[in-house]
Image (spheres, coloured by chain):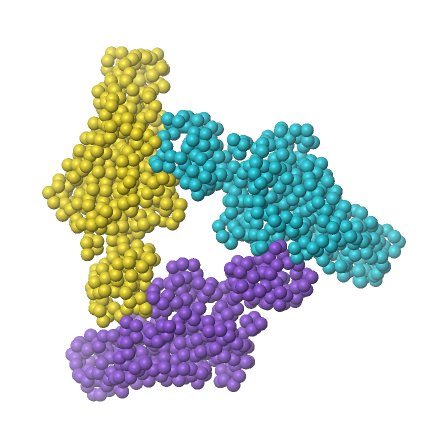
Chain colours: A purple, B cyan, C yellow
């Protein structure tokens, strides 16, 4: 009965570093701290560094797709390589320096080497006047330009110091060269080729919640699944840059997408806010899909609120998975969604924003979702006329002996009543308001007793 | 126009004893008082006594199914015969005696003749510490054991009197013998073989609301239907022990169940609480069935609130009718459901709990439900293009002359508009918020005028 | 791109009288004032006068259907011609006179020339005791009778003056003669024969809101559509007497009704109350139809509340369009519905009840509904796998340059995502909560760029 097994305890993590940390939240926070500084981007060295760091913990297949490759309606871009980038005073002292933080340079900026007065430079400076102590995160992947990001306080101080006519030295020693786009996949083989897909974007540099936290949670989830019993589903983790990564992966796997039964885009899994779930496209346009329902049931069973929102074609890579040609059953789990916390896409999205207990709860929630999706099954009641006599089969005692006791007996009646071949255990868990694990355990007992057969 | 006829007035009950009582609630309460003491059980003499009492009022077919007969997944049990059962002090004075109340003995207890200290006897004593003056009702139909039920006060007094070491004489002179399970059916033939089924469990001894009250209400309903005009539906009343009675009846009628168009399990119809309706299985899993909708409309028309609840596979015999193999259109009407009033399954479920006005209201509600189910019909408007001119057919005057006056004219417009062959008068009553009886009367006038034909 | 064009500005009205009035509300109010006195009726001169007045502003086809013609279940009645009608004192002074107001005479009264005491006359007098200063509006189209309507104050004064025995001279010089029923149609040819139908009853004499206001609004709407760009839909306006007009028109056009894709009955469009929309029959019995949804979206986009109500078979001519044989997609737009304002069907429904700003808002609402219905379209996304790259097609800039800017970019993503051939722009406007005009504009840009093709 592999599906009914409880999730592997942390002790089973084995020889990994995290296993030494008794508190999984602390272990996850440690990973975030370790990975936060990587200079991730749409392509290039920082992204590869991140993928390698993940692959130290779980076996990963890394693919490289060359610049210039046509992928769906797009083209894999050149790699961006930066050697140095800074603004300096006439005396050479640095005002902002990319070496201090990758956020200081607009991602994908073209090369510049110039000197110009502050007033002319302003068109290339990005600050947040409403949050004057934070550095914004800016990209310009598809339009060739350049710019620097700094705190508004720093800009004001500079203006006071040198005036609008003061000259500033601008150096961006960068180039866009033929290279490749890098993607990493972790595949945990299951009993069947039916897949659950988890996808986390890996292109945001130096931001903790968006999306280092999700990379850490996904990695830990993959480890646990690897160390746990074999699941019915094959479970795939995709770590790739946002938008273009998903597009490239979809382009390369077009023929195999039918095996994806359920999926979740993972983002912002570390902040202290509650969970937010964005439904699949098909689940919003029609009736909720299994993954939409599994998230709701898992959260209910964990006693956690979840803010369920309909699909919309903006956001993270659910946009690509949910494009009308693919229409994949992929929802999105976040804590606070993008744009809804003040530190979003700023230097304020730092280690302090990410909480150990939030990371741990995100991991537990994902494990519970996997348990529901993987444990869901359709059965046919072999004694559908009237209630079967549970007592003479020893089932009242057997069910009553489960930790859930009376709830398991109730669950058995529900499973028997709804198992007409069209409804699954997830239906039972929804209608009965009983925990999915109780329903699953009751179904196992009934199946052992021959009262259920797979439908 | 048989279906549109008003329910027979109490005066039409004829020569019956109840007919002499001007107040139907008082008549019903008198029946409950008369029947309450019967020592009903899963099988045996008390059950037969109850069925005979009903058959004095309505012609009943009584069936006996021998012990040992396989019925669905079950077996008809042996009959339980008790000659005497008591607990006595060493001096022979009785502590509790089955002769005083059948509740004192756990139903289906095996024979015992022994003397034991109070501390050892405690494992066989059932009390209600939270309701110390009430005797609980307990059964052990499917596990051979024995026990006595008494008030917690009496147990405390006994312990104070004789101490834990005090010896108690235990006598249960009972046997389980081959016999039969008894069921009674009252069938009121209608114009068609389409059936409405009412089912009330008849196995609980000495409890007034659960279910003597429903036996009385069902009997009176059957009398009234017998004395009233012929209905379109054949109406069947099943009086049988809970669970095993329904299972046995279903087993014996497997091939004929297709004629059951609508049904209601009746329970707890005497207490002062409001009505609770439990939907049919199919009506909960899909859209509400006719009986589900008829109960709602009948209650609305009577100005009574009803708490409508979804089907669940626990409760009374709707569990069996609603097992997935049968999936019959059978709901359940109660006042306060089992387990939701403090006197449930205790000696507190006595005559005082059952109110004449509640019994009368339950009867009226069931009559209204029958009127809706039996009066519902699909028609086709013969002048579906534009409104037919009611005035030149004398229908405005004819409808305006009905007691419902303007409402009947409105009802006529609704019936004409919705009678496209797919919708019934129940649809009209729901959408128009007009009383079903008004809708039915308007349809009769329209049919007489040739504006409607049966669809 | 004809459908995306903005509605013609008032200045394009050209040489019309209204064009000189800068305020369209004032222009509409002027029309109501001009048309209010017409002695409209089910047939006859007043109705023709009204239709001719409309035909001075928009080209109208006027049809006459002879008395006695069978139309559906009805017969075209005779024309009612009144020469004079009054009540007079014995000295010849007039008490009430039809010449002062058509409301004073029950519509379709038969001829009378008699003298009778006040007490005997009372059976033929109609007043409103609760609204003693108002004259009621009464008709008796289908039962031959006669009567006068006056204020309750006037009746009381008369009784005080002459006593119940006082003699009153009754003169109704009227006749019912073979003639015809008159209907007017304004048809604005579109690119296709698919039709939007607007229908306004034109039979109520001397009432401003019911329905002179709607006649004025519909006429102005027709003018604007005539002067505007060609629409995809042919748009038909029907001006005819209530009930019998619709029935006659339906009878005459039975074979052509399939071209009616959407329709609205227009009534009471001048009072200061909010909008009330009554759904189509099919939209109430099933899922809302396009016109039901278009009204909701148009009102939302205009920032106006609308009270949406289900179809019922009472009201105005939606009763006929929504009879089960026709079941046309015709809803009804009013401000305050009939019977829900105290001046309804009384002399209080006068020019003061009708507000210029309400008339103007009604016109704007109808224009917005036409824009939605005519601009709605189904497309197929030609790049449905992943998001197409808008940037390299210049679409981000092009969409960003629209007045709606970022909303237009969002709208483009929504249109691309939902354009799978089964969903239309109305679906997009509903789900995205973006204005329909923004969605329409975005779709135009996408279609120009080849990313959408008609589905």
Q: Residue furthest right?
A: B91
In-image side of B95 versus B15 (left or right): right
- The residue closer to the viewer here, B135 or A413, is A413
Name the foreground residue: A48 vs A106. Answer: A48
Q: Which residue does the image show at 62% across and 41% down from the upper left?
A: B236
Reply above or below: C383 against B409: below
Query: Would residue C312 be found to the left or right of residue A227 on screen?
Result: left
Q: Is residue C79 above or below residue C404?
A: above
In the rendered image, is residue A185 in sight?
yes
Q: Is residue A80 left or right of residue B240?
A: left
Q: Quadrant of the C terminus of chain B?
A: top left
**Residue at horizontal 21%, vertical 33%?**
C63
Q: Is residue A294 left or right of residue A450?
A: left
Expressed as whole percent of the image width and height from the top left, the position of residue C181 reads: 25, 30
In this view, the residue farthest toward the left is: C15
Residue under the image location 36 percent in, 82 percent down: A63
Whole-percent x, y for residue A17 in the image: 49, 85
Position in image of residue A295 (x %, y %): 46, 66
Q: Extreme front residue here? A: B255
Q: Where residue B264 appears, x then y in whole percent?
A: 59, 45
Classify B355 as above or below B114.
above
Q: Is residue C229 above or below residue C387?
A: above
Q: Quadrant of residue B398?
A: top left
Give the tally of numbered discs.
Answer: 0
Q: Tell me where residue B89 sits by quadrant.
A: bottom right
- Res C303 visible: no
The residue lying at 44 percent from left, 67 percent from top is A275
């Amino acid at each position: 009965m592999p599906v009914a097994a409880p999730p592997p305890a942390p002790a089973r993590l084995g020889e990994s570093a995290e296993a030494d940390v008794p508190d999984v939240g602390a272990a996850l926070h440690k990973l975030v701290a370790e990975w936060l500084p990587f200079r991730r981007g749409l392509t290039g060295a920082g992204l590869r560094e991140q993928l390698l760091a993940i692959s130290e913990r779980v076996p990963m297949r890394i693919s490289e797709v060359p610049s210039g490759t046509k992928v769906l309606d797009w083209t894999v871009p050149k790699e961006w390589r930066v050697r140095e980038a800074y603004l300096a005073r006439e005396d050479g002292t640095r005002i902002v320096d990319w070496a201090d933080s990758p956020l200081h340079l607009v991602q994908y900026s073209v090369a510049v080497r110039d000197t110009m007065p502050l007033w002319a430079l302003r068109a290339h400076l990005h600050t947040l006047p409403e949050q004057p102590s934070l550095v914004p995160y800016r990209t310009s992947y598809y339009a060739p330009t350049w710019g620097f990001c700094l705190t508004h306080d720093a800009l004001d101080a500079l203006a006071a110091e040198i005036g609008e006519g003061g000259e500033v030295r601008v150096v961006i020693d960068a180039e866009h060269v033929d290279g490749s786009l890098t993607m990493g996949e972790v595949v945990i083989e299951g009993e069947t080729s039916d897949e659950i897909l988890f996808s986390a974007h890996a292109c945001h540099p130096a931001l903790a919640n968006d999306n280092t936290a999700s990379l850490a949670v996904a990695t830990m989830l993959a480890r646990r699944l690897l160390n746990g019993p074999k699941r019915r589903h094959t479970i795939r983790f995709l770590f790739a840059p946002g938008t273009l990564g998903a597009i490239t992966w979809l382009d390369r796997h077009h023929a195999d997408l039918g095996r994806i039964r359920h999926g979740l885009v993972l983002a912002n899994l570390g902040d202290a806010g509650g969970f937010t779930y964005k439904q699949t496209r098909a689940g919003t346009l029609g009736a909720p899909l299994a993954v939409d329902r599994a998230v709701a049931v898992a959260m209910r069973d964990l006693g956690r609120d979840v803010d369920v929102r309909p699909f919309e074609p903006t956001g993270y890579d659910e946009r690509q998975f949910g494009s009308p040609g693919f229409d994949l059953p992929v929802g999105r789990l976040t804590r606070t969604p993008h744009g809804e916390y003040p530190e979003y896409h700023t230097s304020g999205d730092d280690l302090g924003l990410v909480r150990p207990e939030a990371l741990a709860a995100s991991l537990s929630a994902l494990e519970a979702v996997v348990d529901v999706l993987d444990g869901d099954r359709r059965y046919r009641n072999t004694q559908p006329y009237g209630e079967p006599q549970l007592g003479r089969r020893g089932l009242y005692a057997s069910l009553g002996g489960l930790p859930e006791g009376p709830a398991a007996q109730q669950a058995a009646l529900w499973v028997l009543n709804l198992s007409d071949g069209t409804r699954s255990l997830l239906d039972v868990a929804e209608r009965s308001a009983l925990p999915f694990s109780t329903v699953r355990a009751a179904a196992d007992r009934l199946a052992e007793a021959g009262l259920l057969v797979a439908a």
